[in-house]
Image (cartoon, grey):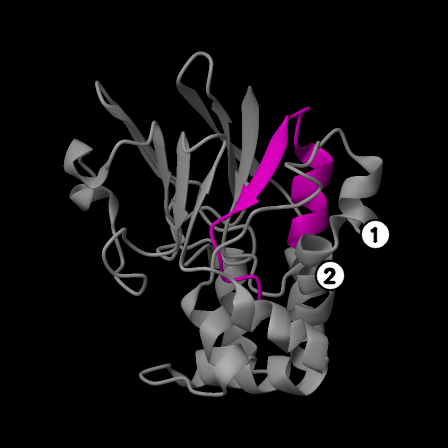
Amino acid sequence: MRIGVISDLHGNEVALQATIADMPAVDGLVCAGDVVGYNPWHAACVDAVADPGTGPIVDSDVRLIDGMIPTVKGNHDRAVATGHAPHFNHMAQAGVEHAREQLSADQIDWLDTLPEECHVVNGRVKLVHGHPDDPDHYTRPAEFGPELLDGEDVLIMGHTHVQHHEIYDDGIVLNPGSVGQPRDGDPKAAYAIVDLDEMAVEERRVDYDTDAVIRAVEDAGLPRQIGFRLAQGR
């Protein structure tokens, strides 16, 4: 069984469409949070994940798990749902405010009801956003270790926007990287494929039109730095 893994879309519909178009055939797709924030297409990204039967997945080779894309709540999802964004910088705060203006009440409710933790494939795969014990902790590659696993075969985390994985005797710890705002020095959208039969991971990157996103960020009145950092992958 092969599972597609995405995270940190951050309202970047252009990158999400390119990611889905690039994704090979998989038996399910999961998302480690932060569907919204920063970039201007919050509503389109929520719709694509919350109602995949009407989004870019329809024409892809991606199958769904019980008709859904299991998704956990990221810190930007929580901030948009609650209107409370403590410790966010001006770019993140602007993205939250823009999302709250753009999203419908139902879309905000969907963000609010996302779980902090999710188990799929009969418990073999666990999703969190930041860390198993703290959804807001940035678990960087240097902190990866088998002690993060708690009986699952695969632990998936997002939040850092840094693509990385490690394979241990007890299982896999994976961050697929960010679809919508990579911060590991590579501007290409990041995602991963997990093969649960082979217990293997394929890290993947895909080019997309960052210039179009930069223009859309400026047209939306969002801080220009949000767009500029996409070209640098920082």
In the picture, the quarter occupied by the N terminus is top right
Asked if residue 40 shows in the view, the reply is no
Ranked by sequence position, the earlier of labels 2 and 1 is 2
The verdict on residue 33 being magenta is yes
Secondary structure, mark 2, is helix
Measure the C-alpha gap from mark 2 to mark 1.
Answer: 8 Å
Q: Is residue 173 left or right of residue 50?
A: left
Which image quadrant for residue 200?
A: top left
Given the image, on which type of amino acid does mark 1 rest?
Thr
Kindly check if marks 2 and 1 are in contact, taking CB atoms under 8 A apart as contact: yes
Q: Is residue 92 left or right of residue 152?
A: right
Q: Amino acid at mark 2?
A: Asp
Q: How many marks?
A: 2
The residue at 46%/53% (across/down) is 182
Query: Is any atom of residue 126 visible in this view?
Result: yes
Res 48 quadrant in image = bottom right
Q: Residue at x 79, y 51 (%)?
A: 55
Residue 128, relative to residue 58: is it above or below? below
Identify the element where label 1 is drawn: helix
Disc 2 crowd rating (10 Å Cα; few below 14, some 14-19, many 20+) is: some
Q: Which residue is mark 2?
A: 47
Residue 120 in magenta stretch: no
The stretch in magenta equals 14-36
The residue lying at 62 percent from left, 68 percent from top is 110
* Relative depth, front residue between 162 and 65: 65
- In the image, residue 218 lies at what x, y percent? 66, 79
Residue 28 rendering spot, x and y as whole percentages: 62, 32
Q: Residue 130: x and y, percent?
A: 32, 56
Residue denoted by label 1: 54
Residue at position x 36%, y 31% in the image: 154
